[in-house]
Image: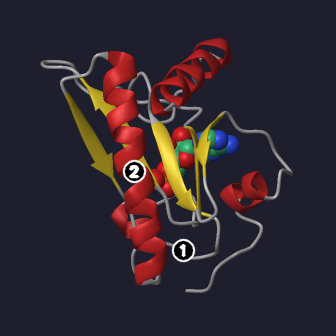
């Protein structure tokens, strides 16, 4: 399967559609999921193209993991979370819907389940959550 440069996350990276930025560096970008399954649900992506875990380079994966760790600790602090769930889906059969590699970061609290997928969040709340995580990165 080849990379489609018109996927929605590529458009976000090009600034063609808006996103709630949490963090970026030279290799990666982190922004809020607009259908959050947890308060603070955000996505970490490489700035360079790849579909998923199956075609990602080791450099892309290493860069994403460094950002995942940074954002996970910040989200844990910002939300007073007890833990973090990290998700990655590859190809349709694996549950992937957007074909640019991404890692879901979920702050988790004891006894609280992830919400159902596919439900649009409140944009003001998502914006506030982005700012809270961002502030905790420093
Ligand atoms: P998946 O490919 O299954 O890992 O899921 C793609 C994720 O992208 C879902 O959690 C969607 O809610 C999220 N998503 C889709 N469009 C956008 C968007 N424009 N901005 C932020 N998140 C999005």
Secondary structure beneath label 1 = loop
Identify the residue position indicated by label 2 in the image.
Answer: 68
Q: Is residue 4 left or right of residue 128?
A: right
State the separation of the CA atoms marked 1 and 2.
Answer: 18 Å
Q: Where is 82 relative to 33, above or below?
A: above
Rendered location of residue 81, percent (x, y):
26, 21
Q: How many C-alpha atoms fall within 10 Å of the one at disc 2: few (<14), some, or many (≥20)?
A: many
Identify the residue position indicated by label 1 in the image.
Answer: 51
Q: Is residue 3 left or right of residue 5?
A: left
- How many numbered dots are placed on residues in this image? 2
Rendered location of residue 136, percent (x, y):
46, 26
Residue drawn at (40%, 74%) of the image: 53
Rendered location of residue 20, percent (x, y):
67, 33
Q: Earlier in the sequence, mark 1 or mark 2?
A: 1
Residue drawn at (23%, 25%) of the image: 113
Residue 128 visible to an observer of this rendering: yes
Rendered location of residue 41, percent (x, y):
44, 33
Secondary structure beneath label 2 = helix
Verify CB contact (< 8 Å) between mark 1 and mark 2: no
Q: How many C-alpha atoms fall within 10 Å of the one at disc 1: few (<14), some, or many (≥20)?
A: many
Query: Residue extending furthest left?
Result: 111
Q: Under 8 Å from ligand 1: the CB of mark 1?
A: no
In the depicted view, which residue is nearer to us: 27 or 81?
A: 27
Q: Where is 132 relative to 97, above or below?
A: above
In the depicted view, which residue is nearer to us: 4 or 85?
A: 85
Q: Nearer the viewer, mark 1 or mark 2?
A: 2
């Amino acid at each position: 399967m080849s990379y489609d440069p018109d996927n929605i996350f590529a458009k976000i990276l090009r600034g063609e559609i808006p996103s709630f930025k949490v963090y970026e560096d030279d290799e990666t970008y982190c922004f809020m999921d607009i259908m959050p399954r947890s308060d603070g649900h955000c996505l970490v992506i490489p700035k360079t193209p790849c579909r998923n875990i199956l075609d990602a380079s080791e450099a892309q994966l290493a860069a994403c993991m460094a950002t995942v760790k940074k954002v996970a600790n910040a989200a844990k602090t910002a939300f007073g979370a007890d833990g973090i769930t990290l998700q990655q889906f590859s190809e349709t059969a694996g549950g992937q819907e957007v074909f640019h590699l991404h890692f879901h970061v979920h702050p988790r609290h004891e006894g609280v389940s992830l919400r159902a997928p596919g439900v649009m969040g409140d944009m003001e709340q998502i914006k506030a959550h982005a700012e809270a995580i961002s502030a905790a990165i420093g």
